[in-house]
Structure formats: structure tokens, C-alpha cells
Image: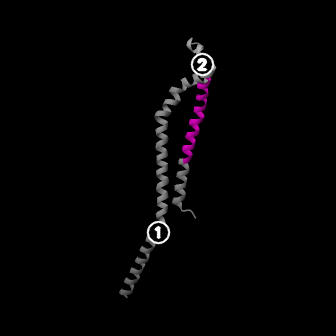
Amino acid sequence: MMSKDKLTSAVFIVLGILLIAGSNYAMLSYATPILEALSNFATQNNVYTLQQCGAEIPHELQKLGSDLESLIIPFMYLGVPLIMAILSFLMFLGGFYYHKSRFAPQLEQEKDKERELLRKAVLKMESENK
């Protein structure tokens, strides 16, 4: 049977893994349209058109220009460090509860020995007082 600490450790580790997977998915799902826009820009216009500055800019590239200040820069300066701080905290908690669960049986045995010694000492004192 899984102890409470092992279960808590597993929950924090799973949360950390979900955070990693979610941030990777978000980055990949956002990077794909950007790469497609850059690819469309590079393949639909030839060098002659680019030299004449008459390039037709795809809508995705225009969207990238508007998203730069509202999404990309704030995410780079706030989102990534925040995600890393949360991930570090979750992994710390996962490791803490994992190691706590490893030493829980040993601590329980020590407590049982202590209780037994106290019980014997009390019995000995009671028998001496009678």
C-alpha cells in the first residue's frame, strides 16, 4: 500500500510533468504557425520581388508583428521564469515527500521502541513503588 507521503510525492511529480508537457505543447502550437508564416513568406516571393520591396506579407507574419509586444515579449520575460519557478517548487515538493516516505517506516520503528521503553520504565517504577 502506498503511504500518504509517497502519494503526495507522486502527485507533485505528475504536476511537474504536466507543467513541462503543457508548456512544450503551448510553445510548439504557437511556433508552428510562425514557422509556416516564415516559410510562406520565403517561398511565395522570389528574390526579384523582394528586391523591388513589393513583397506580399502573409497574414500570419502581420499577426506575428502585433503579437510580439502583447504575447511573445511578456511570455519571455515573465512566463518562462514563472514556469521555471513553479516547476522547481513542484519538483522540490515531490522530492521532499518522496524522501520523507522513505524514512517514515524507520521513524515509526524508532517511535515504537521509544514507547516500549517508556512503558517498561513506567512498569518498573510502579513495581518499585509498591
Which one is nearer the viewer's eye here, 47 or 15? Answer: 47
- Is residue 19 placed above or below 75 in the rendered structure? below
For the record, the magenta segment spans 17-40
Say left or right for 92 vs 24.
left
Q: Secondary structure at mark 1?
A: helix
Q: Amino acid at mark 2?
A: Ile
Q: Secondary structure at mark 2?
A: loop
Provide residue 102's location: percent of width, then percent of height: 48, 62
Tell me which secondary structure the magenta stretch mostly adopts: helix
Q: Residue at x 47, y 46 (%)?
A: 88
Q: Quadrant of the N terminus?
A: bottom right
Of all residues shown, which one is farthest toward the bottom?
130
Q: How is the image coloured?
A: one colour
| Residue highlighted by disc 2 | 57
Q: Residue at x 52, y 26 (%)?
A: 68
Of all residues shown, which one is farthest toward the front?
47
Residue 115 forms part of the magenta stretch: no
| Residue highlighted by disc 1 | 108
Of all residues shown, which one is farthest toward the right?
44
Q: Residue at x 49, y 36 (%)?
A: 79
